[in-house]
Amino acid sequence: MSIDLVLADLRRIYQIQAAQSDFCGVLSLTEDDIQRWSALIGATRSRLYDEVAIHLARGFNDSEQTFEFCDAVMNGVHGIISNADEERPELFWKVYLAFDEGEYYHGNNRQEDPVAAYTRPLVAQILADVSSR
């Protein structure tokens, strides 16, 4: 099965949760979500995490996905990984950290857009590294 079905599910969950007044930028995902998506694409959890991360990175890099959506998904998936005490796959972790860099002003420099200054170049570098393999 295609990762596209997982991404569609994530977009649906994001739309519902982001519309709530108490949404804090972290997608609330469940263990059942992860198990269902792993089975749907026929992959291990680690592979699922990497697939989600690389597709979000590509979508963001191509301006098809917003920073807010990608960051919320990455935070939600990271929460599942942390709660399950799983190891973070290397690719997932790199993409997670790239989005994390866009969440705050670096050096309290409010003149600089952290998404443009940090996340975009980091994501571009990750994608370049992946395509060169």
Image (cartoon, grey):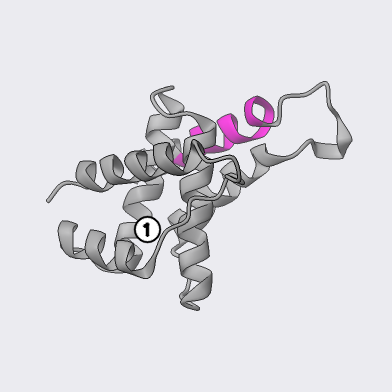
Taking the magenta stretch, the answer to whether it contains residue 118 is: yes
In the figure, residue 12 lies in which quadrant? top left
Residue under pointer 1: 49
Q: Eyeballing the image, is 6 above or below 43?
A: above
Name the magenta segment's main secondary structure: helix
Where residue 106 appears, as percent x and y from the top left, is 80, 38
Q: Which of the pair 4/53 is nearer the observer?
A: 4
Q: Eyeballing the image, is 44 above or below 52?
A: below
Q: Which of the pair 11/106 is nearer the observer?
A: 11
What residue is at 68 percent from the left and 40 percent from the top? 103
Where residue 67 appears, as percent x and y from the top left, is 53, 32
Taking the magenta stretch, the answer to whether it contains residue 68 is: no
Is residue 52 shown left or right of residue 107? Answer: left
Q: Eyeballing the image, is 98 above or below 48?
A: above
Residue lying farthest to the right in this orientation: 108
Residue lying farthest to the front in this orientation: 21
Type of the residue with mark 1? Tyr
In the figure, residue 57 lies in which quadrant? top left
Residue lying farthest to the left in this orientation: 1
What residue is at 45 percent from the left and 28 percent from the top? 61
Query: For the magenta stretch, what is the residue range?
Result: 115-126
Where residue 96 appears, as percent x and y from the top left, is 54, 51
In the figure, residue 13 lies in which quadrant? top left
